[in-house]
Image (tube, rainbow, N blue to C red):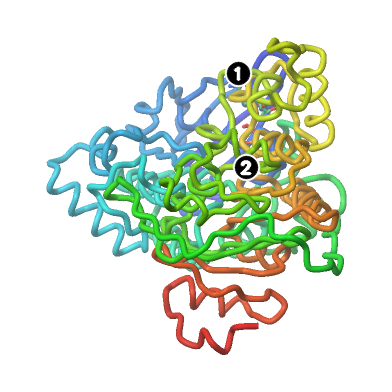
């Protein structure tokens, strides 16, 4: 091939005992879209951080456009023309979109606003330049990250799981964007757990397993099953089927809920009505930023209602609108939030303490003091049962790879044996094997009679798991649709607000 844009030779990086990257060789051709594939914890993000100058390698050589280079910091990488969109966002939440952009992109504010809008239009990455980042959904934040990166005109663009929270239409648009960028001379390093996407988009793929390169292939020559096998070293497990269940008792009910958040950037909810019964899964579909965050906050107890509205949210038959999160959990409610680092876990604390955050009521405290033996056993069980790859329960949550932390949080909440489980994007960033394992767990719980509310942007996940689906669009919920009687396109229509034909979709 022509001189590679980037070549890595024998790159290694360890964190204490963990060999995150071991003797990695990689060549990224000019004008190519190159996938990096591997299970959670295989070392993909570490490798990208080395290329972007966030971390420095312990050994090995990096060659950029034919010349050896070292990249002591991200600003050095950016100067060379390397840009990166992170899996965990690097935006300042209290600043607006344009303020965040101006931290890395020079230019007058008005010009930056115009460029943000133009890129949004051109590449389907619409976002309000004046919105405060803390008010944006995860999907919208990702758009900001991508726009900000594109504004530095990179020669190599690194995208760490950019599609994990994008709705299908946006994924297609993003792929068009990436192809156009490639054709215009940019190379792209693309990390994704979605094998079909890699097959559709990428020219090359490098497979990592346990920090080492185990294959270099053209992904178009292999089907998704093949790729999965190369990645996880065995065949993929099969999904568990939904058992027929008797109609169970109502465990969650929202009754005509109108909600006007104080924040002007938040989405108001209008006449939201839903119910989740024991032994069923209700899926909420929709493009992020349509009220998912507000709905999740109201159900989890992060936002509470006034006394008069208290009975518009019922849990296990009780009005809980005024209850805080802890009071709701006491009724048998468990919750996996969307934002695993900000809300689901405290990155600086050990897994033992992160377990305690929500499981302290399950005998892990003794006269108000932490029962270390029990708390450690809880974390160890979660690590074992949910295949969390970590050096042990004393590891800090922040040191886990993204997918492994997600597995820990989902596991922790399932271990609480809830009556009502609310999960938001449960398999976001989780590799294919672990995704199937998490979905199997959710289906098993449903088959055991747990009521499950699932917010997901993955249509395939919603169809695989949900008995019923409702679509959230502009703060309004569609009617309850029986999954067995609808097609993906029906959901798509509701997602973009074209709700004509609602009657014919009613089960
Ligand atoms: N700062 C750190 N401190 C300690 N260990 C780390 C750190 N960063 C990464 N690791 C470890 O290095 C290994 C590789 O992690 P990495 O994040 O590169 O995996 P990944 O392939 O990107 O996984 P995922 O798909 O879950 O994002 C993991 O075992 C992880 O726990």
Residue 474 in percent (x, y) is at 39, 65
Q: Quadrant of residue 367?
A: top right
* Left or right: 320, with 485 as reference point: left
Residue 381 in percent (x, y) is at 83, 28
Residue 63 to residue 250: above or below: above
Depth order, front residue of 54/344: 344
Residue at the image point whose x is 35% and y is 35% from the top: 93
Residue 244 to residue 145: above or below: below
Crowding around mark 1 (Cα neighbors within 10 Å: few <14, some 14 to 19, many 20+) is: some
Q: Nearer the viewer, mark 1 or mark 2?
A: 2
Residue 498 to residue 123: above or below: below
Ligand 1 contact, mark 2 (Cβ < 8 Å)? no
Q: Which mark is residue 349?
A: 1
Q: Disc 1 and disc 2: Cα gap in Å?
A: 18 Å
Q: Which mark is residue 414?
A: none
Ligand 1 contact, mark 1 (Cβ < 8 Å)? no
Residue 186 to residue 247: above or below: above
Depth order, front residue of 319/61: 319
Q: Quadrant of residue 400?
A: top right
Crowding around mark 2 (Cα neighbors within 10 Å: few <14, some 14 to 19, many 20+) is: many
Q: Which mark is residue 336?
A: 2
Numbered disc 2: secondary structure: strand
């Amino acid at each position: 091939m022509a001189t590679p844009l980037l070549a890595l030779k024998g790159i290694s990086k360890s964190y204490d005992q963990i060999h995150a990257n071991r003797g990695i060789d990689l060549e990224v051709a000019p004008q190519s879209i190159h996938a990096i594939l591997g299970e959670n914890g295989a070392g993909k993000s570490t490798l990208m951080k080395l290329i972007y100058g966030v971390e420095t390698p312990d050994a090995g050589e990096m060659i950029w456009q034919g010349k050896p280079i070292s990249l002591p910091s991200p600003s050095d990488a950016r100067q060379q023309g390397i840009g990166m969109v992170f899996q965990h966002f690097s935006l300042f939440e209290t600043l607006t979109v344009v303020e965040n952009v101006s931290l890395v992109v020079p230019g007058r504010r008005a010009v930056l606003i115009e460029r943000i809008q133009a890129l949004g239009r051109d590449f389907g990455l619409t976002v309000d330049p004046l919105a405060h980042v803390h008010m944006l959904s995860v999907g919208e934040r990702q758009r900001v990250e991508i726009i900000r990166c594109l504004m530095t005109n990179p020669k190599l663009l690194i995208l760490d799981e950019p599609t994990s929270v994008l709705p299908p239409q946006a994924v297609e648009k993003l792929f068009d964007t990436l192809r156009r960028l490639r054709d215009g001379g940019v190379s792209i390093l693309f990390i994704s757990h979605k094998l079909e996407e890699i097959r559709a988009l990428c020219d090359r793929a490098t497979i990592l397993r346990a920090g080492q390169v185990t294959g270099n292939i053209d992904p178009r020559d292999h089907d998704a099953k093949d790729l999965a096998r190369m990645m996880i070293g065995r065949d993929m497990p099969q999904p568990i089927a939904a058992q027929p269940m008797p109609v169970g008792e109502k465990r969650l009910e929202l009754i005509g809920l109108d909600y006007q958040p104080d924040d002007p950037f938040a989405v108001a909810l209008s006449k939201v009505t839903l119910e989740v019964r024991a032994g069923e899964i209700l899926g909420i579909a929709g493009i992020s930023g349509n009220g998912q965050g507000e709905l999740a906050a109201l159900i989890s107890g992060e936002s509470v209602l006034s006394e008069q509205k208290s009975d518009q949210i019922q849990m296990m038959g009780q009005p809980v609108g005024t209850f805080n999160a802890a009071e709701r959990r006491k009724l048998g409610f468990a919750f996996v939030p969307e934002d695993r680092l900000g809300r689901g876990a405290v990155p600086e604390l050990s897994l033992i303490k992160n377990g305690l955050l929500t499981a302290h009521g399950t005998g892990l405290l003794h006269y108000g003091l932490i029962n270390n033996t029990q708390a450690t056993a809880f974390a160890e069980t979660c690590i074992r049962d949910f295949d969390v790859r970590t050096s042990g329960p004393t590891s800090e949550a922040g040191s886990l790879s993204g997918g492994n932390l997600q597995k820990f949080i989902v596991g922790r909440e399932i271990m609480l044996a809830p009556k009502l489980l609310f999960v938001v994007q449960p398999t976001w960033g989780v590799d294919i094997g672990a995704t199937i394992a998490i979905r199997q767990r959710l289906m098993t719980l449903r088959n055991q009679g747990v009521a499950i509310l699932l917010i997901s942007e993955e249509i395939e996940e919603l169809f695989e798991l949900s008995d019923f689906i409702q679509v959230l669009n502009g703060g309004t919920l569609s009617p309850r649709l029986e999954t067995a009687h609808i097609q993906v396109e029906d959901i798509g229509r509701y997602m973009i607000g074209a709700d004509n034909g609602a009657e014919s979709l009613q089960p």
